[in-house]
Image (tube, rainbow, N blue to C red):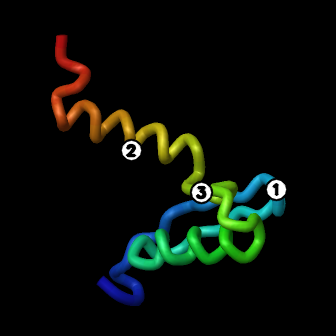
């Protein structure tokens, strides 16, 4: 996917007080670059926490980890 077909993901960095949306295809690289250049490699910036939690829940459900 490229251009308009590439969904965007909300990211946040509380230390820098920044919030933005980035293309999904560029997410990992942009987060790595931000954290390397601004926070000495510490994983400070990341996917918006509510979205990250929802994705984790969906993945756990899909993997059957929530089955009783």
Element at badge 1?
A: loop
The residue under the point 73% across, 67% down is 40
Q: List the single residue furthest toward the top.
A: 68
Where residue 46 appears, as percent x and y from the top left, is 59, 57
Nearer-N-terminus badge (1/2): 1
Give the number of the disc on residue 55.
2
Where residue 49 appears, as percent x and y from the top left, is 58, 44
Neighbour class for label 2 at 10 Å: few (<14), some, many (≥20)?
A: few
Where residue 15 appears, as percent x and y from the top left, is 82, 56
Front residue of 8/64: it is 64
Give the number of the disc on residue 15.
1
Nearer-N-terminus badge (2/3): 3
Quarter occupied by residue 3: bottom left
Which numbered disc, 2 or 3, marks the residue closer to the eye?
Answer: 3
Q: Quadrant of the N terminus?
A: bottom left
Quarter occupied by residue 32: bottom right
Looking at the image, residue 48 sits to the left or right of residue 25; the answer is right
The Cα atoms of the two marked residues, 3 and 1, are separated by 11 Å
Element at badge 2?
A: helix
Q: Is residue 14 above or below residue 41?
A: above
Q: Is residue 54 above or below residue 4?
A: above
């Amino acid at each position: 996917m490229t251009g308009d077909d590439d969904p965007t993901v909300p990211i946040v960095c509380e230390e820098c007080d920044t919030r933005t949306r980035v293309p999904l295809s560029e997410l990992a690289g942009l987060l790595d670059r931000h954290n390397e250049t601004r926070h000495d490699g510490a994983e400070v910036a990341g996917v918006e926490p509510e979205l990250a939690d929802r994705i984790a829940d969906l993945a756990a459900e899909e993997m059957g980890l929530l089955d009783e």
